[in-house]
Amino acid sequence: MTRGLKLLTRVALFSALVYVFTWLTASLPNISLTLFIIFMAGFVWGSVAGSLVGIIGMGLSSAFNPYGPAHLYVMLAQMIGAALSGVVGGAFASGGWRQTGRKKLTLSLALIGGGCTILYFLPVNVIDAWLIGPFWARLTGGSLWSLVSVGSNVLIFPLLFGVARHLYVRENGTQ
């Protein structure tokens, strides 16, 4: 299998994982593994692949929502926000994470988990508040509710990074 076809297959698989995990964790309000999956795709295969996983996976989740599709502008904001986690994953892979000590790596991953969540919810909350309003009340309420996701991803990213590291080594052959 050629490298391009192999990468395309992985992007499709991880996009499907984003869609599936969106609904597997739907009963846990604002706690989800989707941003970590997108980050992991960017970390393992690069920013472009990670962004595509975010765009496609979140697009599927928003368009084929069993409660009804998201408003077009909200869906686009979700896709853009999710894509940013793939960019962050790619940037993190090209950084000096291999030489980082365990405590510093854990702290970095916690900050990245919180940061990816903020990057996701910022455009989503702004568009949602703009569409539904009143703007400031809706934005404040949505931002406060988003803190649950920030807190959960501060824990999820460091806890699951071993999975990303294992896949990175398997795919790239380097530690």
Image (spheres, rainbow, N blue to C red):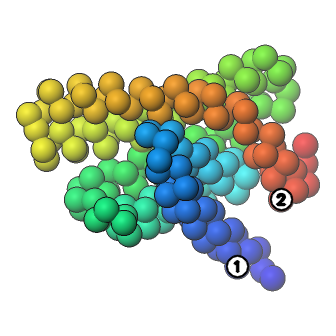
User: Looking at numbered disc 2 in the image, what kind of residue is underneath it?
Assistant: Glu
Residue that sits furthest to the top in the current view: 103
For the residue pair 162 and 81, the one nearer the viewer reads as 162
Kindly identify which numbered label has been placed on residue 5: 1
Q: Position of residue 65 (x, y in %)?
A: 37, 64
Res 126 → quadrant: top left
Seen at 62% across and 51% down, the residue is: 37
User: Looking at numbered disc 1 in the image, what kind of residue is underneath it?
Assistant: Leu
Residue that sits furthest to the left in the current view: 134
Q: Contact (CB < 8 A) between labels 2 and 1?
A: no
For the residue pair 95 and 152, the one nearer the viewer reads as 152
Q: Position of residue 31 (x, y in %)?
A: 51, 39
Which secondary structure lies at badge 2?
Answer: helix
Which secondary structure lies at badge 1?
Answer: helix
Kindly identify which numbered label has been placed on residue 171: 2
Quadrant location, the C terminus: top right
